[in-house]
Image: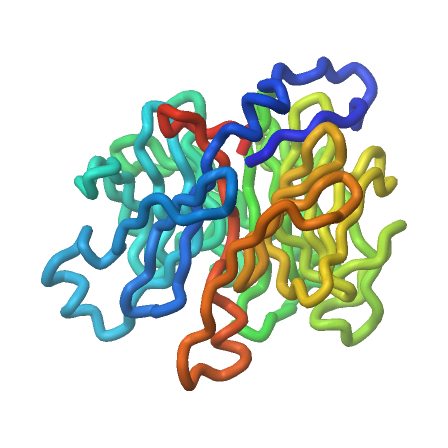
Amino acid sequence: MLIFLLACAQEGDEPATVPSPEAVSGGTILLGVSEDVADPLVVELNAKGESVWELHVKSLFGQEWEAMERKPLLMDVQPVAGGSILLSLYGVGIIEIDRAGAVLWRHDDGEASHDVDRLANGNTLYARTWAAEGEPAVVEVDRAGSVVWSWSGEEAFGSNALFAGYRDEQDAWMHPTAVQRLEDGTTSVCMRNFNMVVLLDGAGKVTRQISFRAPEGAEGPATKGNLQGLRPHGAEWVPGAGLSVALRSPDRALALKDGQIMHEYRGEGVEGITDVDVAADGGMLIAAHRLVQEVDAQGAVVWEWAVPAEAGASAEAAARHIFNTISRIDANGAPIDFD
């Protein structure tokens, strides 16, 4: 993800070490595309927004894929230092592959969904977006696939009258769309249907909560916050800096500092923003359900890459081809990000 520098979000934090803007802008971009749910793709774009490499996910499974009555949904594509790639496939789990399409590691969990990250300790952190109340919504596993940490959110929010017994349109209680392990061991969880981003300590206790303001009946419980917005996606912290996040109603990409908007982008016709990365100068890399855009600090589009709508697809289906995070990588395939 294109890394941005903002002033410290909390007093006492040290600035993060980040690549120069020149190094960042030279990277390519990895994303997942589910234009055809029976044949999802991993796509790499160059700095001009041109497709330079792709991989058919079904090629990783052979006959196993053909035997699946319901094909898994490609939710996240996350590069790993060393050049491998993590894929989160809802309905199957997490698969680590190399560029040749060889499977290096697999963790079977059909509830794995929107976001997966390889941690510095070699473990893997991921979201389980549609888990039931009381079940883990965020999980960390080791290379053997054993759970070493998890968080359900029930202790923090289960007794809250606003969220107790809540169900979203997919019958899920909590709906995490982004997870991140910060350098100090804090875990960030972005919760779409709770309209908030929280920071957790190692015991799973909420140490900070950023809520957005949503009215009653606005696709979820009414929540209060300084900033109007629904369904947060793609929340990412740069350690010692700030927060980028995508919000709906209206759709916009934001860079926040201490709860205040530093940079904002509302692209004409850009709907369903799922990820945003902000450069030091205010430029942004944005993923929506059918579109990837890079814009400069003035909001002018530098380049864009659009997914063609499936012939005969419903408007909703045609709008949901790119689901979650996009990531910048360097010449060695390593992520240029903190997520």
Up/down of 158 relative to 18, above or below: below
Q: Nearer the viewer, residue 289 or 182?
A: 289
Hey, which quadrant is residue 223 in on the image? bottom right
118 horizontally vs 216: left or right? left
Q: Nearer the viewer, residue 14 or 29?
A: 29
Question: Which residue is farthest left?
Answer: 63
Res. 251 in view? yes
Q: Nearer the viewer, residue 226 or 208?
A: 226
Hey, which quadrant is residue 216 in on the image? bottom right
Q: Residue at x 44, y 22 (%)?
A: 120
Q: Residue at x 28, y 69 (%)?
A: 38
Q: Position of residue 96 (x, y in %)?
A: 28, 39
Q: Residue at x 68, y 32 (%)?
A: 279
Q: Residue at x 77, y 44 (%)?
A: 210
How many badges with numbers are in the image?
0
Q: Position of residue 291 (x, y in %)?
A: 55, 59
Up/down of 255 relative to 288, above or below: above
How is the protein colored in the picture? rainbow
Quadrant housing the N terminus: top right
Up/down of 75 relative to 184, above or below: below
Q: Nearer the viewer, residue 175 or 309?
A: 309
230 horizontally vs 42: left or right? right
Res. 234 in view? no
Q: Position of residue 12 (x, y in %)?
A: 79, 15
